[in-house]
Amino acid sequence: MSKVRLIQRMAIIIVVPALLVLFIVFGWWIALCVEIGVVLLLIVVIAFGMVDMTLKRKASIWKDDVSDLGEFGKLNDHVKEAVTWLETGDLWEQTAEDGLKLYGRFLKNEGSHTYAICCHGYKNQRMQDISNQAKRFYGMGHNVFAGHARGHGKSEGNYIGMACKERRDIVGWIRKIVAMDPEARIFLYGVSMGGATVMTTSGEKLPPNVKCAIEDCGYQSAWDEFCFHLRWVFGLPAVPILNVCQVIARARYGFGFKEHSAIRQVKNTRIPLLFIHGDRDTFVPYRMMKPLYEACGAEHKKAVSIEGAEHAEAYWVGEEAYWREVGAWLDAYL
C-alpha cells in the first residue's frame, strides 16, 4: 500500500473515531450529528460510485478495431492476431434465463468430439485474455467456443455479473453443444473473472458430457475481491461500504456480492478441477487459490503455482509448466 493510501486509511481508522469521542466528551452534539451525517453520506456516495464503476456497462456493444486492446508489451501483436483469429468463428446466440441475448464464437475442428468452453475476464470486451489459449486448444484438436459474457462484447446486458450470473449462461452454452453433438466431451476453461465463472459453473448440475475444468487466477467471491481492493488498493474500510453496495446491486441487478460465490460453489463440484495461479498476482491475490482448492469437493483436484507470473500472465510467463499441466489434465480427464 502506498504512503498516501496508508495515511488515508489511518485517518479513517483513527481520526474519525477520535473526533466522535471528542465531540461526545465536550458535548458538541451538533458537531457530532454533522460528522455522523457526513460519514453516512460519504459511505452512500462511495457505494453508488463503486457499483457504477465496477458493475455498470460502459463499453459499446461492439468494437471493430483491435488497436485499443491496451498495453500488452511484447504480447501485443500476438494478442491482436489471436483475437482476430477467434473472431473468424461462427457467431452463436442464446437467450439467457432472464431474456438477455448472448453471443459467442465457435470454431469447429472437423471430426472432433472434444470441446473447450473458454470464459474471458472482467471487461475483456474482445476476449483478449483467452484468445491465445483458445487458439492453442484448437491446435490441440479441440472444438472451441468462447462466449461474450453479459455486459461484454456483442452480448446484451447493462451490467457485469461478476461470475454470480454468468454460471447459468455457461450452462446454456453447454446445452447448446450437447444438443448439437450428443457425443461431446466438454471441458471448461477461464481466466480471472472467467476462472471464477468456471468455478461457479462447476458447482451447478451439469450433464455428464462435462468432463473437467481448468480455472486460472479466479477469485473466491465478488465480495472478497472488492474487499481486497477497497482495503489494500484504495485504503477504505470494506464494511460498511460493501454492505451498502450489496443493497444497491440487489436492487439494480438482482444479485449480491456473496451470492453464488466461487468458494461456495466449488464445494458442490464433482468434475475434476485444476487450479492455476501466478505467485506474483496482486490483482486477484495469489493467496485466494489455497482456500478455493481446500473447499473444492471434487475427488480429483490439483493446485498449480506459476512462479513469477502476475495477474492473467501465467499461460505465457510459465508457458512450459503451464501447458504441461493443462495437457496432462486434459489427457487424464477429458
Image (cartoon, helix red, strand yellow):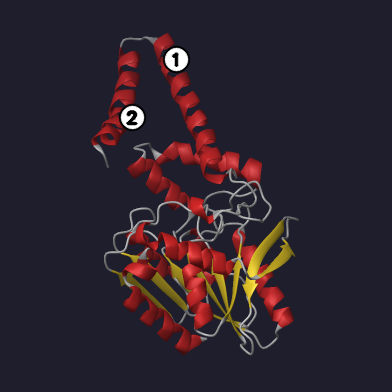
Q: Quadrant of residue 154?
A: bottom right
Q: Circle 1 sits on which residue?
A: 34
Secondary-structure class at tag 1: helix
Label annotation for residue 161: none
Eyeballing the image, is 144 above or below 74?
A: below
Location of residue 35 in the rendering, given as x and y in whole percent from the top left corner: 41, 18
Question: Depth check: 195 or 75 in front?
Answer: 75
Tell me what residue is drawn at x 64 percent, y 52 percent. 62
Q: Report whether residue 232 is seen.
A: yes
Eyeballing the image, is 15 above or below 169?
A: above
Give the number of callouts.
Answer: 2
Question: Dot 1, how many residues are within 10 Å of its Cα: few (below 14), some (14-19), or many (20+)?
Answer: few
Location of residue 16 in the rendering, given as x and y in whole percent from the top left corner: 34, 24
Question: Dot 2, how many residues are within 10 Å of its Cα: few (below 14), some (14-19), or many (20+)?
Answer: some
**Which amino acid does the dot numbered 1 rest on?**
Val
Q: Quadrant of the N terminus?
A: top left
In the picture provided, is 4 more to the left or to the right than 31? left
Q: Circle 2 sits on which residue?
A: 12
Eyeballing the image, is 132 above or below 49?
A: below
Closer to the N terminus: mark 2 or mark 1? 2
Q: Quadrant of residue 162?
A: bottom right
Q: Report whether residue 200 is seen.
A: no
Tell me what residue is drawn at x 35 percent, y 42 percent. 233
Name the residue at the left extreme. Answer: 3
Callout in the foreground (2, 1):
2
**Which amino acid does the dot numbered 2 rest on?**
Ile
Secondary-structure class at tag 2: helix
Tell me what residue is drawn at x 67 percent, y 50 percent. 157
Q: Are marks 2 and 1 in contact (CB under 8 Å)?
A: no
